[in-house]
Image (cartoon, rainbow, N blue to C red):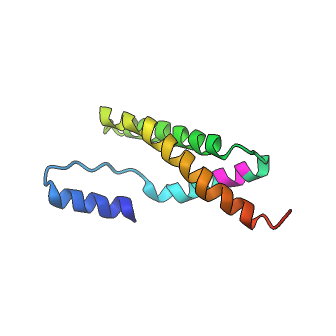
Amino acid sequence: MIPYAGRALLSVAWPGFVTLDAPFYLLPIVWGAWNVVWVRRGANAPHACGATLGVALATGGNLLMASRGAWAPSLLVLFAFLPTVYALAWTFIVAPLNDALDGGA
């Protein structure tokens, strides 16, 4: 929801703002699949798991925009932003939830 609302607000605030059509709706599916793989492996380094997901999504996003002819150098920021945010989210949100919902199995 936020990426779509943010794009609309930015296009109203700056009429010349160019929006990119990225498939944000796929992110929950990717997060869920990645979490299943992480839990199945029994990995115990949640920050590395989140950072790896961030690198994979940054690479995929850049390749997607390049294949559509909409790539811009500013998209390289994703390689610094996504791994950092996803490592923090995975360490402090997803890993504790996985541990809490594990049920002692």
Residue in the image at 25% along x and 62% along y:
8
Nearer the observer, 92 or 81: 92
Residue 43 x %, y %: 75, 45
**Quadrant in the rendering for residue 5:** bottom left
Q: Is residue 72 visible?
A: no
Nearer the observer, 2 or 104: 104
Q: Specify whether residue 66 is painted magenta.
A: no
**Quadrant in the rendering for residue 98:** bottom right
Residue in the image at 36% along x and 58% along y:
3
For the image shown, how many numbered marks are present on the structure? 0
Would you say 99 lies left or right of 84 here? Answer: right
Residue 74 x %, y %: 31, 36
Indicate whether 103 appears above or below 73: below
Magenta residues span 34-38
* Outermost residue, left side: 15
Q: Main secondary structure of the magenta part?
A: helix
Indicate whether 103 appears above or below 52: below
Residue 4 x %, y %: 34, 61
